[in-house]
Image (tube, coloured by chain):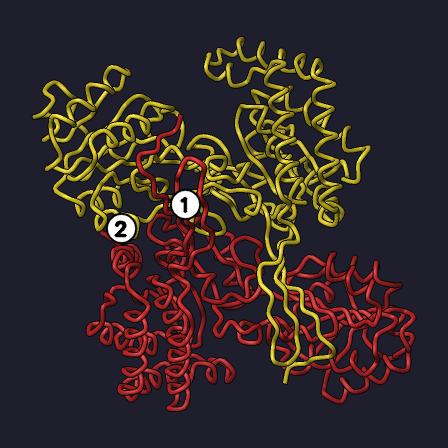
Chain colours: A yellow, B red
Amino acid sequence: MISEVRKKATLAQEAAVAAGRLSTAQKNDALLAIANALLTRQEEILEANAVDLKNGRENGTSTSLLDRLALNSERIAGIAEGLRQIVELPDPVGEELQSIQRPNGLDIVQIRVPLGVIGMIYEARPNVTVDAAGLCLKTGNCVVLRGGSAALESNRKIVEIMRDALSGTALPQDAVQLIEDSDRASVNEMLKLNGLLDVVIPRGGASLIRNVVENATVPVIETGAGICHVFVDASANPGMAAEIAFNGKVQRPSVCNSIETLLVDASYSSEQLQALIARMAEANVEFRGCERTLALLPGTRAATEEDYATEYNDYILNVRIVDGLDEALGHIRRYGTKHSECIVTENADNAERFLHEVDAAAVYHNASTRFTDGFEFGFGAEIGISTQKLHARGPMGLPALTSTKFRIIGNGQVRG
Amino acid sequence: MISEVRKKATLAQEAAVAAGRLSTAQKNDALLAIANALLTRQEEILEANAVDLKNGRENGTSTSLLDRLALNSERIAGIAEGLRQIVELPDPVGEELQSIQRPNGLDIVQIRVPLGVIGMIYEARPNVTVDAAGLCLKTGNCVVLRGGSAALESNRKIVEIMRDALSGTALPQDAVQLIEDSDRASVNEMLKLNGLLDVVIPRGGASLIRNVVENATVPVIETGAGICHVFVDASANPGMAAEIAFNGKVQRPSVCNSIETLLVDASYSSEQLQALIARMAEANVEFRGCERTLALLPGTRAATEEDYATEYNDYILNVRIVDGLDEALGHIRRYGTKHSECIVTENADNAERFLHEVDAAAVYHNASTRFTDGFEFGFGAEIGISTQKLHARGPMGLPALTSTKFRIIGNGQVRG
């Protein structure tokens, strides 16, 4: 018997032919129809969400997870508004990337085309269900959604509403599929569905992403882990260094572009460093220090190798004093995850070396790593932040959900 | 004990820091040094190659494989000339792809950077050893080469010469590594070397590529299979249709951009079709036909489902008569490998529908599919033809061997 995963991916693959052909206006109409339907039928969504929340409480789900799971009128309005913002974005499909005239008269144009069918594997938040579907549909793709089991009732209702809304539009209903089988095996089946899924995008915690990367034969766009650093160079402006480090750690520690380790040049003012640390301590940051840091701040816990390699996502910061730029670069090479890295310095040569030599999706001179984000970069929407080097790196806007095609027009040319 | 694969990949990863920093001139100097050394030391290469050929003959290797394996003065001169051509190509590293000024004063520039370390897994021809290394080094990457065991002695000598030549240049010798362990396990170890290899590129037959795609956790750029079609529409110019179909099948049947199936509109002149088939038959093409083709050409063997799904790479052609464009599109959707597809027609609407609706790396109107090739597209070199949709699709020039990086320059900006 054909599995749910294969059946729905096949339907999506069939729908992809029609979806890829639609005009921007037709796709936007479909997105607006979904946005309206989510608002009109929000009571149904809230009822389904209440079931998820009740199940969650009975299963002892943590308060923070329940909070992420919970929907209300305001959140649903935000989700619908997100779709309207996607409508406003330019459609990358059809964009000409290069145009080549060959001496033999061949006319070659490379254009953006949809990827086809995108598998999204994600965790609790039901807003991702709409958000991901919206981004995929805008780019002419179909989507097979596999959300976390904790949000199953909410996702089922949301997808039902999205598919109902599509019935009045040019976009086939089968462009949006939800895998309801909450067994882990359904994820693993998706990962091997070459020929039916064109790409899989995992969004979630480290273990979810690791499972996808390790087991997928379908191409993957990896998003995720960020062990980011701020290096305060000897010549750093102390006020600026303090603001950037504080912002990197404290403004929102739970996200991937926050910092985990502060590297400080040994020549940097120890008073300034102590002041910065005192300010962070007031904001409830705990520290792990290298030996020299411990001498400066007695009573601090020593940083281990494992600490330097940990994405805390929490109010914890490693502090390491280094002898100059090269030692800082070496530390980042060893422990960084190639996400976002920052140097604070007034020394132009050191800034240029840092920007040139650090291998990361985003390298900063005198600005917070927290800016690594599709909205902050002006892309207007974000599928996620790619931490891989192929296809897309860093914040991914709509073009990351496209492939390309060469259109070649001749008048009978053959190869000699 | 640390394996050969891990040891050499680690050396390459360490060398990648320096390789990525070099100027175009420094990289070109290194490539020219290699080209010169290969010519100067060609006797050593020929001696090593003679050992491979002797071993091959003793092991009963086929004549065609021995031919691909064999080097001579002329072939070595061709390999060195290939490096000189790579020197002439523009260096994509450092190219600005976008420049964004944000209202908060952040200056964001996206530039091309090397991928890092590229694993190449390939089969017999020793010219790939130099060719692949040249393309990787030009783009600031390091390379871990794993050639076929049949060419081990040749590859060992070639890599020794390349590394010796690098010793007089700015490029570290460790930028080029050869895996000498000819056990299949060394390939499988490469495929799981996340963190040390940034990408793996397989070049070779279907089973080599399948093994890589199915087992790699490192990102892969898939190259390879091509089941390509020519569709002769009702309005096709018969002379043009005949030339394009003939060229697609006969000019070089062994390559991925040759055609396997000819689709012909039922309204197309049966005399013209018969003439075309007669011409191909003279060129020793065998046919597999659909029912209607068999009625036209009694004695032809019937085409099976499996035939339509086979990349013959040989003088064999399926011929299928279809009722119009939609049936042709359906056939291509079902059996094509999304490589190169062609319509021959004088009907502009049908041409546009074909170019728009066929999902393939290259779609042609009135030109041979044999043009899907980096040199023919004017890229000047080719790593291979990507048959995947992520990162690169179709013929891959040097930019396909790069990633990108966002450089962000601020004056103390933090996120609110």
Q: Nearer the viewer, residue A305 or A233?
A: A233
Q: Nearer the viewer, residue B231 or A61?
A: B231
**Chain where mark 2 sits:** A
Residue B389, position as x, y percentages in the image: 58, 54
Residue at x 67% of width, y 39% of height: A137
What mark, if any, has residue B122 been given in the picture? none
Against B164, is A268 above or below? above
Local SS, label 1: strand
Q: Quadrant of residue A156?
A: top right
Q: Quadrant of residue A295?
A: top left
Residue B63, position as x, y percentages in the image: 50, 85
Kindly identify the amino acid type of the residue bearing the numbered disc 1.
Ile
Residue at x 55% of width, y 34% of height: A121
Q: Quadrant of residue A81?
A: top right
Q: Is residue A302 left or right of residue B328?
A: left
Against B9, is A200 above or below? above
Residue A132, position as x, y percentages in the image: 60, 34
**Chain where mark 1 sits:** B
Residue placed furthest toward the left = A295
Q: CA distance from mark 2 to mark 1?
A: 14 Å
Residue at x 41% of width, y 45% of height: B108
Marks 2 and 1 belong to one chain: no
Q: Nearer the viewer, residue B221 or A215?
A: B221
Query: What residue sits right under mark 2 in the picture?
Result: A352
Against A36, is B233 above or below? below
Kindly identify the amino acid type of the residue bearing the numbered disc 2.
Glu
The count of marks equals: 2
Query: What residue sits right under mark 1 in the picture?
Result: B108
